[in-house]
Image (tube, rainbow, N blue to C red):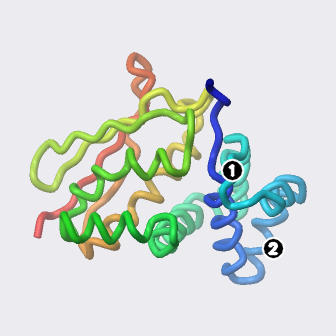
Amino acid sequence: MSIGPVVRSRHLRSILEQVARLPALQRDSVLVAIGPEPTAAIEASTSADWLPFALDLDVTHALERALGPEGKHRFFREHQLASFQSPLFRALVDSATAIFGLDPGSWARWIPRGWGIVFRDCGQWVVDRTDPGEVDLALLAPPPGCLDDEIWLRSLASSFSAFLVVAKTEGEFAFVRVDRARAAALYTLRWTPG
């Protein structure tokens, strides 16, 4: 039985924890942009709860309003880096590093598994390693309205750009475009193989 698009509360709670680490002026600006009701709903949940996906959209847009596009990009990259140290992802990161080393393309293959831990009924990732230093990715059938939401689509690229930081390599994880025929958001990961 489908329950509609939902997000694990732990993900949203970790975003609020990251907001709390911002400098006071930015932190207060983000909290005002998010608003008291969404913040209270997230804080009242347990880490294992599933919350409406709309809260993820609300928080993402609030971060863009408060921090601007570049600030939001840095926020989501830093949030993902911090998430890699969390109990939820630490074992996954350790396994990926032990098996694949620090190759960003191999790490990208773990996106579908990580996505399923955090999101439910929010689409499915397809990862295609094309050439050395190149991976093409597609998020198929994201929640309704998301293919029209460039702020949210770009926030995913910002988060996944953390792979390059962990791999200690130069490159880019980028949102490319929406493919309406496939109902998909298309991304690329490019880096200089070591």
Q: Position of residue 156 (x, y in %)?
A: 48, 50
Callout 1: few (<14), some (14-19), or many (20+) C-alpha neighbours within 10 Å? many
Q: Which residue is mark 1?
A: 61
Viewer-proximal residue among 57 and 61: 57
Decide: few, some or many residues near mark 2? Use Cα within 10 Å; few <14, some 14-19, many ≥20: some
Query: Above or below — where is 160 with respect to 148?
Result: below
Amino acid tagged 2: Asp
Residues at marks 2 and 1 touching, judged by CB atoms closer than 8 Å: no
What separation in Å lies between label 2 and label 1 (alpha carbons)? Answer: 15 Å
SS under mark 1 = helix
Quadrant placement of the C terminus: bottom left
Residue at 39% over, 61% down: 161
- Say which element carries label 2: helix
Q: Quadrant of residue 63?
A: bottom right
Tell me which amino acid carries mark 1: His
The disc, 2 or 1, on the residue closer to the chain's N-terminal end is: 2
Question: Where is residue 53, by image quadrant?
Answer: top right
Q: Is residue 166 left or right of residue 192?
A: right
Residue topped by disc 2: 28
Left/right placement of residue 125 relative to residue 141 reads left
Q: Please state the horizontal and vertical placement of residue 36, each as a whole percent of the image.
A: 89, 59
At 72% across and 77% down in the image, what residue appears?
20
Q: Image point 22% across, 40% down: which residue?
A: 128
